[in-house]
Image (spheres, helix red, strand yellow):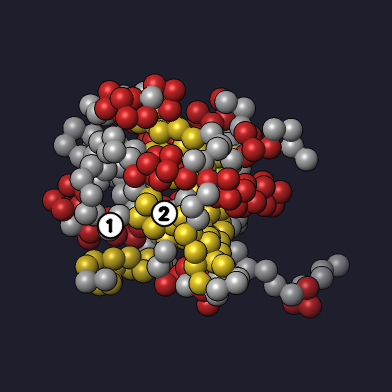
């Protein structure tokens, strides 16, 4: 067993920009979550003082955004003067923060989580988790499993059809929310892309012959997509979601195409064409 396993595997970092109200921090506070959690902001955020006022100086970690973007692969040449950098600088900086703190894994959560839930075998339905200690243990189980199996990205799903009770024992091979990531450099796959970084990260992980795991037994609910101010909401309203889709297509054009879903432009990825496959040993060919 790892010494101080909770501290080394289960620290929560909430990446946020321009949203000092931070729904995720509010939810964790309401639940009296007992573990370590922090909000990570870039020093280009002019609302940092509000974050500190709302959550305390010790909760807010600030990274050098201007230095981080020098090493950020946005998959374009638009620069950062008239275009936002997206979440990638914060995600990579959070990895560095966690590694420098001596952690082995860490959680990266978005800032818009209103509730956490888990399948309840007694009722056969998903049940909101109100006790922070229970959430901590559930997240720790995932983190420990991911550490023992060397999974580059593990997590749980949004409260959508994927989190329905009928799907509780299923899992997806990509993680789009609540990322449990390695803090060590050997397993970490650096984030890329100005937009759609979660899809791109899943594509990159599979390209390297590895796999992510999104567990559907647990779930989280968020504010409606692209409706809360701050973050990238205003940028999406200005350029539309077709540009968001374009990044995933550029990164993996052989398995990704532009479609219309949910009443807007969206990506469709043929994950089966790139996901790691485990074959029965009877198909193994031996050569002399």
Q: Nearer the viewer, residue 16 or 242?
A: 16
Q: Is residue 178 left or right of residue 9?
A: left
User: What is the CA distance from the residue labelled 2 to the residue labelled 1?
Assistant: 15 Å
Quarter of the image holding residue 278? bottom right
Instruction: Give the structural element (helix, strand or loop) at label 2.
Output: strand
Mark 1 — residue? Answer: 225
The percent coordinates of residue 41 (x first, y second) are 35, 31
| 32 relative to 58, above or below | below
| 100 relative to 216, above or below | above
User: Residue placed farthest to the right in the image?
Assistant: 288
Mark 2 — residue? Answer: 115
Q: Residues within 10 Å of mark 2 (few under 14, many from 20)?
A: many
Q: Is residue 75 left or right of residue 129?
A: left
Quarter containing the N terminus: top right
Q: Nearer the viewer, residue 105 or 260?
A: 105
Instruction: Give the structural element (helix, strand or loop) at label 1.
Output: loop
The percent coordinates of residue 57 (x first, y second) are 39, 21
Depth check, mark 2 against mark 1: the one in front is 2
Quarter containing the C terminus: bottom right
The percent coordinates of residue 27 (x first, y second) are 40, 45
**Measuring 65% from the left and 51% from the top, which residue is drawn there?**
141
**Measuring 31% from the left and 49% from the top, which residue is drawn there?**
195
């Amino acid at each position: 067993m790892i010494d101080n396993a909770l501290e080394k595997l289960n620290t929560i970092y909430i990446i946020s920009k321009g949203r000092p109200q931070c729904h995720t921090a509010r939810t964790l506070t309401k639940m009296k979550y007992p573990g370590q959690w922090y909000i990570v902001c870039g020093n280009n955020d002019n609302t940092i003082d509000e974050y500190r006022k709302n959550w305390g100086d010790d909760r807010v970690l600030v990274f050098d955004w201007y230095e981080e973007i020098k090493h950020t692969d946005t998959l374009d040449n638009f620069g950062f003067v008239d275009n936002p950098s997206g979440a990638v600088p914060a995600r990579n900086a959070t990895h560095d923060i966690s590694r420098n703190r001596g952690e082995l894994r860490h959680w990266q959560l978005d800032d818009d989580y209103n509730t956490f839930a888990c399948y309840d075998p007694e009722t056969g339905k998903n049940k909101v988790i109100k006790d922070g200690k229970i959430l901590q243990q559930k997240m720790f189980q995932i983190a420990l499993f991911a550490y023992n199996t060397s999974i580059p990205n593990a997590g749980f799903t949004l409260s959508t059809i994927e989190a329905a009770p009928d799907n509780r024992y299923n899992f997806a091979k990509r993680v789009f929310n609540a990322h449990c990531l390695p803090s060590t450099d050997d397993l970490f796959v650096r984030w890329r892309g100005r937009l759609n970084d979660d899809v791109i990260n899943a594509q990159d992980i599979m390209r390297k012959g590895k796999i992510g795991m999104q567990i559907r037994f647990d779930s989280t609910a968020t504010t409606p997509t692209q409706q809360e101010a701050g973050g990238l909401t205003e940028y999406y309203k200005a350029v539309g979601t077709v540009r968001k889709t374009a990044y995933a297509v550029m990164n993996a054009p052989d398995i990704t195409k532009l479609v219309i879903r949910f009443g807007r432009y969206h990506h469709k990825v043929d994950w089966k064409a790139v996901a790691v496959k485990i074959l029965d040993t009877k198909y193994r060919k031996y050569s002399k």
